[in-house]
């Protein structure tokens, strides 16, 4: 049975291990306490399951920083970078920005943290599952529920790793050290699909926690996996690399069967799940820090703020409008929208001016008097209102060209967290995503009219005053359905860590980068677009396996070309 390298198996202190390993590079087997001292009561299992969920947006694992490798903030760079939605400031330096510019290599720190964190999550899930077979106080129904949620999370972690790295070692038991080789994509996705299917079959409409995955979450992810595999096979993703590296091939995929399976299960979610698209009046609450009750109506899974650990999603740091995080809840403008994204919106589409904004205090318009900055109250919380974007290239100024989708409440009114933190929940799977996934499956199973109808509810709620759905549909219509689908996914899901994978799976990423207009935002952003074009190569659809991992385990094969 395969076992993980020790430092990717690090487990939460007090939950899984009796001692802390001082360095990720120390290759010693860790020791768990004897089973009879842990995992006896439901409270024990709840604590363990919390540890599994916490990996999604953890900032530290056993005292080691992994912020660059989780949804705390780093994965937004991994999955939004190298796309037509977000580019960096060319003046910014460091390996984090290499993820935006396509210059990442085998020593990238954030890629290494991603590998460490998500394999730690897998190991936590495997430990929990194994403990269910021991003597404990759970009923059979409770055992099934805990196994199903743990298996969903294991599938979630593996899905991210597989989409980013390709084939990775597959483990289905707790680990104490290994020199295992990478498994091919067929083996990895067999594990992922099996885990999601088990969760779909065994979970209820509500999970163990309010924020838990449930059967509908599992179904939505299962449908998205089927669509992902079908599109990768249809569009020959990575085909030119398979001769060098067969483990990352999709030749085993039956794309027609995958699309049919996606259609059937996504139809279940659309027609029978309790989730819904928020209406026009409440749409913006999807991205407001404290509007969590509204978010739970549409979001099937979120990276959750955890009050006990202060694990949060630092969207204020990169995704909210520019402004002091401690005073107005603003960001430090780590990356910028592209002009292409701005132009993809019709003026009747309110998403444009929600997602792309100006700063909270552009060009120091209000000086230090925050009372002059416009504000609004949403669900009882005060939010500052950013300026409107210029909508054009703005020379050297960053003040009117911001990623403004997420909004953080007035930090000065907080009591439970620091003013430079936020309690944002970051959406990972929403009903809008499910609708668009369903549209994709309908199209590829021969129902284009039905597929196009799925756009309507997504667009109806974002119409500006006096606008009509008919005219918006005309403006957005493309004879090529896939072109329209990708554009709509970009408009709806921008900055939600979907774009890079979408461009890869439809075989569009290289041509999209090559054709990206060098315009929009301040001059140093335009320079960064040109840097992305210079750096990008098609083999970079797969991230490099961290060299530190290969140094410890030479059986780990590097992805094609990186090793040359």
Image (cartoon, grey):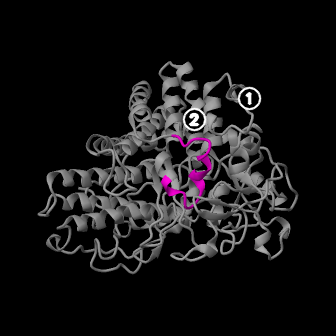
- Is residue 471 visible in the rendered image? The answer is yes
Mark 2–mark 1 Cα distance, whole angstroms, equals 23 Å
* Quadrant occupied by the C terminus: bottom right
Disc 2 residue crowd, few under 14, some 14–19, many 20+, Cα 10 Å: many
In percent of width and height, residue 173 lies at 25, 57
In percent of width and height, residue 62 lies at 39, 75
Number of marks in picture: 2
Q: Name the residue under label 2.
A: 506
Ranked by sequence position, the earlier of labels 2 and 1 is: 1
Q: Name the residue under label 1.
A: 475
Residue 343 is inside the magenta segment: no
Q: What element carries label 2?
A: loop
* Quadrant occupied by the N terminus: bottom left
Q: In the figure, is residue 527 to the left or right of 110?
A: right
Residue at left 30%, top 42%?
A: 194
Residue 290 is inside the magenta segment: yes
Q: What element carries label 1?
A: helix
Looking at the image, which is closer to me, 29 or 100?
100
- The part of the chain drawn in magenta is 277-293
Residue at left 27%, top 67%?
A: 176
* Residue furthest to the left: 135
Camera-side mark, 2 or 1: 1
């Amino acid at each position: 049975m395969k076992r993980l390298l020790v430092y990717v198996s690090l487990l939460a202190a007090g939950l899984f291990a009796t001692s802390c390993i001082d360095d990720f590079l120390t290759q010693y087997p860790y020791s768990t306490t004897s089973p009879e001292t842990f995992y006896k009561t439901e409270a024990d299992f709840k604590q363990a399951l919390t540890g599994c969920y916490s990996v999604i947006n953890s900032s530290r694992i056993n005292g080691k920083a992994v912020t660059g490798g989780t949804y705390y903030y780093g994965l937004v760079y991994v999955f939004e970078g190298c796309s037509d939605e977000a580019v960096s400031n060319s003046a910014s330096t460091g390996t984090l920005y290499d993820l935006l510019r396509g210059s990442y290599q085998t020593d990238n720190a954030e890629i290494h943290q991603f590998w460490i964190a998500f394999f730690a999550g897998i190991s936590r899930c495997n430990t929990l599952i194994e403990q269910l077979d021991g003597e404990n106080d759970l009923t059979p129904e409770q055992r099934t529920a805990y196994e199903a949620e743990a298996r969903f999370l294991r599938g979630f972690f593996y899905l991210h790793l597989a989409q980013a790295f390709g084939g990775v070692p597959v483990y289905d038991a707790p680990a104490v050290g290994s020199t295992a080789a990478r498994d091919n994509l067929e083996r990895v996705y067999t594990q992922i699909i099996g885990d999601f299917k088990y969760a779909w079959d065994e979970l209820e409409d509500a999970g163990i926690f309010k924020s838990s995955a449930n059967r509908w979450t599992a179904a939505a992810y299962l449908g998205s996996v089927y669509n992902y595999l079908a599109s990768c096979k249809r569009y020959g993703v990575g085909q030119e690399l398979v001769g060098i590296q067969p483990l990352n091939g999709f030749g085993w995929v039956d794309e027609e069967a995958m699309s049919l399976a996606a259609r059937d299960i996504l139809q279940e979610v659309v027609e029978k799940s309790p989730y819904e698209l928020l209406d026009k009046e409440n749409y913006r609450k999807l991205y407001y820090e404290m509007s969590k009750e509204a978010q739970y109506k549409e979001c099937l899974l979120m990276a959750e703020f955890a009050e006990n650990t202060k694990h949060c999603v630092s969207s204020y740091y990169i995704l909210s409008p520019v402004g002091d995080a401690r005073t107005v809840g603003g960001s430090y403008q780590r990356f910028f929208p592209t002009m292409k994204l701005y132009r993809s919106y019709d003026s009747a589409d309110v998403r444009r001016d929600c997602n792309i904004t100006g700063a909270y205090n552009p060009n120091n318009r209000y000086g230090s008097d925050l009372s002059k900055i416009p504000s609004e109250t949403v669900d009882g919380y005060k939010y500052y209102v950013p300026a409107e974007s210029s909508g054009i290239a703005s020379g050297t100024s960053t003040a009117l060209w911001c990623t403004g989708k997420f909004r953080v409440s007035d930090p000065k009114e907080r009591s439970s967290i620091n003013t430079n933190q936020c309690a944002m929940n970051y959406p990972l799977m929403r009903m809008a995503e499910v609708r668009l996934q369903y549209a994709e499956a309908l199209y590829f199973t021969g129902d284009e009219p039905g597929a196009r109808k799925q756009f309507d509810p997504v667009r109806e709620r974002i119409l500006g005053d006096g606008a009509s759905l008919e005219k918006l549909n005309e403006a957005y219509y493309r004879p090529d359905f896939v072109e329209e689908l990708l554009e709509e996914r970009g408009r709806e899901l921008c900055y939600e860590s979907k774009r890079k994978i979408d461009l890869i799976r439809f075989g569009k990423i290289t041509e999209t980068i090559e054709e990206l207009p060098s315009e929009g935002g301040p001059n140093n952003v335009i320079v960064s677009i040109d840097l992305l074009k210079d750096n990008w190569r098609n083999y970079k659809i797969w991230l490099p396996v961290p060299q530190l991992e290969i140094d410890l385990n030479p059986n780990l094969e590097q992805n094609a070309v990186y090793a040359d």
